[in-house]
Image (cartoon, helix red, strand yellow):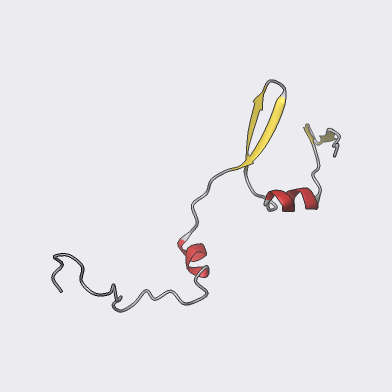
Amino acid sequence: MQAQVREWGNSQGIRLSKDILKSAGIALNEMLEVTVSDGVITLAKTFRHKTLEERAAEYNGRLMLDGEYDWGEPVGREVW
C-alpha cells in the first residue's frame, strides 16, 4: 500500500485506512510512539496500564471485592 504526504493545516500528515488501523489494533485518538532511524519512520503503540475499572470490566461483574476469599487448604506452615 502507498500513502501520500499531504498538508494538514500548518503540518503534514498521512492518512491511514480504517482497515490498516484495525489490523494493527490501533484505535482512534490512541497515542503512538514515533521513531525515525535511517530514513524509516516507525509508529508503535505505547504501553499503558489499565485502570481499575478496565481491569474489573474484564471479569464481567464476577469480581468479588467484598468478604473473604477461599485460598484453599493450608500448605506448609501457615496458621489459620
Q: Is residue 59 above or below residue 48?
A: below
Q: Quadrant of residue 42?
A: top right
Q: Is residue 62 above or below residue 75?
A: below
Residue 54 lies left or right of residue 11; in this view the side is left
Residue 64 lies left or right of residue 2; in this view the side is left
Quadrant in which the N terminus is drawn: top right
Q: Residue at x 49, y 65 (%)?
A: 53
Outermost residue, top direction? 38
Picture mark count: 0
From the top left corner, tell me how far across and down residue 61 is, in percent: 49, 76
Of 54 and 1, nearer the camera is 1
From the top left corner, tell me how far across and down residue 66 is, in percent: 34, 77
Of 50 and 76, nearer the camera is 76
Residue 64 lies left or right of residue 42; in this view the side is left
From the top left corner, tell me how far across and down residue 5 is, in percent: 83, 32
Quadrant in which the C terminus is drawn: bottom left
Q: Residue at x 46, y 77 (%)?
A: 62
Q: Residue at x 24, y 74 (%)?
A: 73
From the top left corner, tell me how far across and down residue 21 is, in percent: 74, 49
Q: Quadrant of residue 12?
A: top right
Outermost residue, front direction? 76
Q: Is residue 76 above or below residue 72?
A: above
Q: Residue at x 28, y 72 (%)?
A: 71
Of 42 and 54, nearer the camera is 42
